[in-house]
Image (spheres, helix red, strand yellow):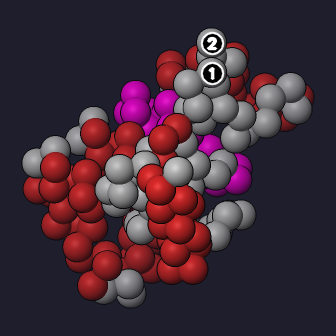
């Protein structure tokens, strides 16, 4: 079952989503019964302005069902515009699904050449992020969750413990 906020994000209804968030009736990072976040839904359904709204209002960029983060969902749907927004917003490019696949792995797996090229460029040239953030109007990064190499190691350890159990 989806929440009203998930439904707004699936439809791209920023006005209704904003009212729900302001009233405090739903946490911006609430998970539906399938483990999807509002940001994950907006990314999957291709609502660029909704994604930007959620990112700028503190939505978690690093969570999702089975390790499938919003950037993974955008890659699945071949939405390079949304991938760029999520990267500019500070998403973890080393985030791994439960199958240990990063966003770059997914872009290669799904044959998303433009996304592969973009992700490889960002990984090689971090300074390009500044230009990307200016271009997309994301000047202030609200990144309330870690995205470091250390966090990636913790996720790997957790996955190892599940596999050995």
Is disc 2 surrounded by few (<14), some (14 to 19) or many (20+) residues within 10 Å?
few
Mark 1 and mark 2 lie on one chain; the one further toward the N terminus is: 2
Q: Residue furthest front?
A: 165
Determine whether label 1 and label 2 are within 8 Å by CB: yes
Main secondary structure found in the magenta portion: helix
Q: Is residue 162 left or right of residue 56?
A: left
The quadrant the N terminus occupies is: top right
Q: Nearer the viewer, residue 154 or 21?
A: 154
The residue where tag 1 is placed is 33
Q: Is residue 105 left or right of residue 45?
A: left
The picture places residue 117, in percent across and down from the top left corner, at 16, 66
The picture places residue 119, in percent across and down from the top left corner, at 27, 67
Q: Secondary structure at mark 1?
A: loop
Whether residue 43 is visible here, answered yes or no, is yes
Q: Secondary structure at mark 2?
A: loop
Q: Nearer the viewer, residue 33 or 159?
A: 159
Structural distance between the alpha carbons of marks 1 and 2? 5 Å
The residue where tag 2 is placed is 1
What residue sits 41% from the left and 66% below the top?
Answer: 93
Q: Is residue 84 placed above or below 16 in the rendered structure?
A: below
Q: Nearer the viewer, residue 76 or 95?
A: 95
Q: State which region is magenta.
A: 38-58
């Amino acid at each position: 079952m989806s929440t009203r906020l998930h439904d707004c994000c699936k439809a791209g209804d920023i006005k209704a989503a904003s009212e729900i968030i302001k009233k405090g009736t739903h946490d911006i990072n609430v998970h539906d019964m399938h483990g999807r976040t509002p940001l994950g839904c907006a990314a999957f359904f291709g609502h660029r302005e909704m994604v930007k709204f959620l990112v700028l209002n503190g939505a978690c960029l690093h969570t999702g069902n089975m390790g499938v983060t919003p950037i993974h969902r955008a890659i699945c749907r071949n939405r390079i515009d949304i991938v760029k927004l999520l990267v500019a917003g500070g998403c973890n490019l080393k985030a791994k699904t439960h199958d240990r696949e990063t966003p770059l792995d997914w872009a290669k797996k799904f044959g998303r050449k433009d996304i592969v090229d973009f992700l490889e460029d960002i990984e090689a040239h971090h300074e390009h992020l500044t230009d990307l953030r200016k271009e997309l109007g994301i000047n202030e990064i609200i990144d309330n969750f870690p995205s470091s190499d250390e966090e990636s190691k913790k996720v790997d350890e957790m996955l190892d413990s599940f596999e050995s159990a």
